[in-house]
Amino acid sequence: MNMPTISPQAQQLERFILEGIPLARSMQLELLAHDGLSLTLGAPLAPNVNDKGCAFGGSLSSLMTLAGWSLIELMLREHGQDCDVFVADSSVRYLAPVWEDLRAEARLQANADPATFLATLNARGKARLQVECLVRTADGTIAATLEARYVSKRRSP
Amino acid sequence: MNMPTISPQAQQLERFILEGIPLARSMQLELLAHDGLSLTLGAPLAPNVNDKGCAFGGSLSSLMTLAGWSLIELMLREHGQDCDVFVADSSVRYLAPVWEDLRAEARLQANADPATFLATLNARGKARLQVECLVRTADGTIAATLEARYVSKRRSP
């Protein structure tokens, strides 16, 4: 059910996630959109509910963490960088319950500088980048937010 | 595979989680220990790996968030309080990869006061409590930490 707009690279990353991370399969994660500056992951509500029938906090934070990770992975792949990307830390706020399918949109933080990030990665083989992510409901309500730092390490010099 | 030390109340909560939260079933979550002051959840590595073969960050944060939630749920049930408990916000640090089965231990934050929490809940029908949680590997390394605030709301006055 991918939209026709996502690139072959994004489709490949979606397969990589679903093959490598069993919990992403359990969540029925989908890569819905990617334009280089932002990336949106989705997941149906049913496998991601809690005891109250709305979205489980762990699903919301996992989806947002993976959206940020995917945004950086695709940026690195587009720049021909072969890296491992790890989340280093994150802050999540749960603002409103989500009673519908989940959508998490990640983008770089306003003060994050991809050029400096890539230069640091080239110079030191390791660099950090900050991402922010939102879960918004269909009526536009912001239901959850994440701010996270990711570390990228080059696999080969 | 519960240890004989956990109470019938803790066993009942484990069933409640596994029945109500499909992702907890996918993670194969277990309630391993509870002594009123702390609560430990476990999960095997296999369903919780990432693309690198170590624990998926989403599994670590979900397990820690649920450990804190379970600690408060059991405290409320022991005091005869019929509440909904929600996580309001959390900060997670990912410090070291986890290459083994996951264990997350939650306890109240040093400055959290259960007596004030219960008094506020009685007076206002709503109260907040702060929890900290650690994932430690078998050799004692702290692999991940969570600090989170939970809101409890009484269902019936």
Image (cartoon, coloured by chain):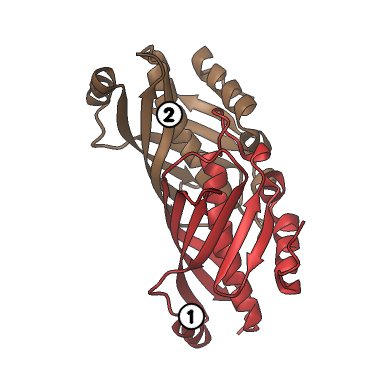
Chain colours: A brown, B red
Compared with residue B36, is residue B56 higher up or lower down, i.e. above or below?
above
Crowdedness near tag 1: few (<14), some (14–19) or many (≥20) residues, C-alpha within 10 Å: some
Left or right of B126 in this view: A35: left
Kindly report the distance in space between the C-alpha atoms of the residues bearing marks 2 and 1: 39 Å
Q: Amino acid at mark 1?
A: Pro
Q: Amino acid at mark 2?
A: Val
Compared with residue B79, is residue A57 higher up or lower down, i.e. above or below?
above
| SS label for mark 1 | helix
Q: Residue at x 57, y 44 (%)?
A: B59
Q: Residue at x 31, y 26 (%)?
A: A126
Across and down, in percent, residue B50 comes to: 57, 33
**Residue A117 marker:** none
Across and down, in percent, residue A14 comes to: 57, 24
Between B101 and B21, the one nearer to me in the picture: B101
Crowdedness near tag 2: few (<14), some (14–19) or many (≥20) residues, C-alpha within 10 Å: many
Do residues under tags 2 and 1 come within 8 Å of each other at their CB atoms?
Answer: no
Across and down, in percent, residue B13 comes to: 70, 66
Q: Quadrant of residue B96?
A: top left
Q: Are marks 2 and 1 on the same chain?
A: no
Left or right of B135 in this view: A90: left
Residue B147 in view in this figure:
yes
**Chain of residue at mark 2:** A
Compared with residue B157, is residue A26 higher up or lower down, i.e. above or below?
above
Left or right of B4 in this view: A154: left
Residue A98 in view in this figure:
no
Q: Which residue is mark 1?
A: B114
Across and down, in percent, residue A23 comes to: 63, 38
**Residue A85 marker:** 2
Q: Quadrant of the N terminus of chain A?
A: top right
Q: Residue at x 58, y 31 (%)?
A: B53
